[in-house]
Image (cartoon, rainbow, N blue to C red):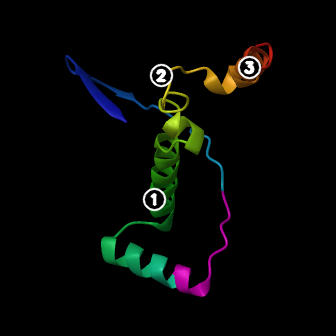
Amino acid sequence: MYLLVLGLQYICITFVLQIFTVMLTVRLSEDEEEQLNAYCQREGVSKSIVVKEAIELYLTQRKKNKNPFEAGADLFGKEGSGSKNNSVSYKKKLKELLREKHTH
């Protein structure tokens, strides 16, 4: 709520913000629940805040982690020849080499 003073008149403005949220149920072991409760009590935060922060951290880390192909993409096909397309054109090159070898 905001209170504005205009001359001698007071105008009260109230903003209503409706936020849609989704409820999520999570199954925890007794040990996990005890640890979560102890942490929340010690830190003075709610379970919801801890779970939201944990999910946000998890998703952020997953975005940073590349799958094995993405992690090595800049290295594949370069060793030895320096050509990046050896894995794509190896059959064609092999046929050419065999043809050359057996035509003499």
Q: Secondary structure at mark 1?
A: helix
Chain-order first, disc 3 or disc 2: 2
- At 66% from the left and 58% from the top, the residue drawn is 24
Q: Which residue is rendered at x = 50% and y = 24% of the image?
A: 81
Residue 101: which disc? 3
Q: For the magenta stretch, what is the residue range?
A: 24-33
Q: Is residue 32 magenta?
A: yes
Could you say which is closer to the camera, residue 13 or residue 25?
25
Position of 100 with respect to 50 (left or right) is right
User: From the viewer's perspective, is residue 104 above or below residue 87?
Assistant: above
Q: Amino acid at mark 3?
A: Lys
In front: label 3 or label 1: 3
Q: Where does the image place residue 60, in percent across and percent down from the top left? A: 47, 45
Query: Disc 2 designates what residue?
Result: 82
Of labels 2 and 1, the one closer to you: 2
Q: Are marks 2 and 1 in contact (CB under 8 Å)?
A: no
- Residue type at mark 1 is Ile
Q: Quick check: 27 left or right of 9?
A: right
First in residue order: circle 3 vs circle 1: 1
